[in-house]
Amino acid sequence: MVVSTSSPASSPPIPTGGGGARCRPPLTLSMPARASRRSVSASASGMPVPASRDPISLPRPLTSADLMEPTGDGLKVAYQGCPGAYSEAAAKKAYPSCQTVPCEYFETAFQAVEACVADRAVLPLENSLGGSIHRNYDLLLRHRLHIVGEVRLAVRHCLLANRGVKIESLRSAMSHPQALAQCEQTLTKLGIEHREAVDDTAGAAKLIAEQKLQDTAAVASSLAAELYGLDILAENIQDDSDNVTRFMMLAREPIIPRTDKPFKTSIVFSLEEGPGQLFKALAVFALRKINLTKMESRPHKKRPLRVADDNCSVPLKHFDYLFYVDLEASMADPNAQNALGNLKEFATFLRVLGSYPTDVS
């Protein structure tokens, strides 16, 4: 299922994620983990390789990931944050019977799956108000995990404080920067002017409870209030009621794509510089009537600048980009296979991040 041209050299994982709560007992991995590679080439095994078949269309052996119960019974699922974080709620929605494993950083969750400490990771990819979680896009490329599903979670922020504290006595609100931004207008109306950003919503609730703060509230979930013994002073304080975060489910092995249900495929590619190159790339999908649901560009960290040859006396330098794209298509569909085969002909780099069922809940 994986399509790849020459891959950018991967650097060793550095555990400094785009989010992380300084709390216990989140998992920390001091050494970067490497997933074991068990693929064996056909030539090494003495089996002939059919020359007439495109590698994209060749079937992949069945793995335990394909047979896993949808409830996640027995699964260990890593997430970033403290117990009570929205990511834990997303993990429970994706795998209701799973055992959740809190991790200090986003990268720690990736490493936990690679090291077989956890079976899956459930991590945020984008929010309807705050936009994309860029750190996780970068980590998708650095690590070799596969997207095996997605889950959408409605975020309902609450204002939490220690027992007996009144809204009138609050001077500050503490939470993750995105949570604070999503409640900016409501907090101002409540007379709470000062904001204190921390790495995790549940971590903010834990800190307020541990330090017994009397003039500071946390913006977090109702579950965090229950776990850390805080009062809920106000519910649904987000400025926009339609506040949804999309999470990705990651595993060491991909699942076998199907065509009997809605599927989505996520890819990342880069292109040569020149007029119409991006238009040409998008045309391979448009001509086959494949809908694109998301496109995200990120600077290519291994090739951050490209010198443009446009006959100027002073050479111009431009950013070199990677394009992350979600397709409404399954890799089991020959139409999608042909589109990626076409894109591979002129892309400088192409990788399938996963082909997985669409969350239609």
Image (cartoon, helix red, strand yellow):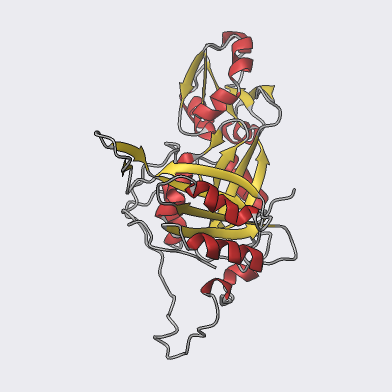
Residue found 44% across the figure and 42% down from its top? 298
Mark count: 0
Residue found 66% across the figure and 22% down from its top? 239
x, y percent for residue 200: 50, 34
Q: With respect to residue 345, does 89 lie above or below?
A: above
Residue found 45% across the figure and 84% down from its top? 42
x, y percent for residue 85: 56, 38
x, y percent for residue 321: 42, 45
Foreground pick, 200 / 355: 355
Furthest toward the left, the residue is 313
Residue found 68% across the figure and 67% down from its top? 258
x, y percent for residue 108: 42, 49
Foreground pick, 31 / 126: 126
Furthest toward the front, the residue is 311
Q: With respect to residue 118, does 311 lie above or below?
A: above
Foreground pick, 300 / 234: 300
Q: In which quarter of the image is the N terminus?
A: bottom right
Quadrant in which residue 148 is drawn:
bottom right
Q: With respect to residue 323, does 211 lie above or below?
A: above
- Is residue 145 visible in the rendered image? The answer is no
Quadrant in which residue 242 is drawn:
top right
- Is residue 193 visible in the rendered image? The answer is yes
